[in-house]
Amino acid sequence: MDQSGFVKLSLIGFALVIVSFVIRGLSRIVLEVAVADLIQAPLAIVGFGLLVYLFVRATLDFVGLWPIERGET
């Protein structure tokens, strides 16, 4: 993974979490709270899991165990 891929994945992770909250808020207008939570949950779990993976990956890069390739600057 290079730096640009890392940044793209982090933006996707944040977008998934934000979209899950938007979906939950909009679906609560029409549906029950429990149904809105069920609709929102998969996006939130995937987004949060992706962000946790990226955090671990960045930590391992900082320590030097699993470096992230640097882009050409």
Image (cartoon, rainbow, N blue to C red):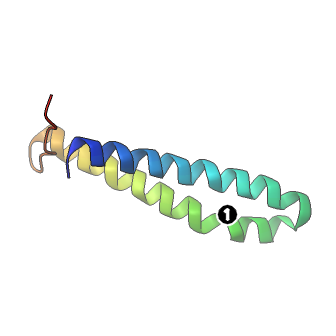
Q: Residue at x 28, y 50 (%)?
A: 56
Residue 6 in the figure: left or right of residue 10 = left
Q: Residue at x 54, y 48 (%)?
A: 15
Which of 12/64 is in front? 12
Q: Residue at x 14, y 38 (%)?
A: 70
Residue 32 in the figure: left or right of residue 5 = right
Image x and y of residue 27, in percent = 81, 61
Quarter occupied by residue 43? bottom right
Q: Is residue 9 above or below residue 46?
A: above
**Label 1 belongs to which residue?**
40
Residue 52 in the figure: left or right of residue 36 = left
Q: Secondary structure at mark 1?
A: helix
Outermost residue on the front side: it is 72
Which of 68/56 is in front? 68
Residue 21 in the figure: left or right of residue 55 = right
Looking at the rendering, in which quadrant would you find the C terminus?
top left
Image x and y of residue 5, in percent = 29, 49
Q: Amino acid at mark 1?
A: Gln
Outermost residue on the top side: it is 73
Q: Is residue 38 above or below residue 63?
A: below
Q: Residue at x 12, y 46 (%)?
A: 67
Q: Is residue 1 above or below residue 58?
A: below
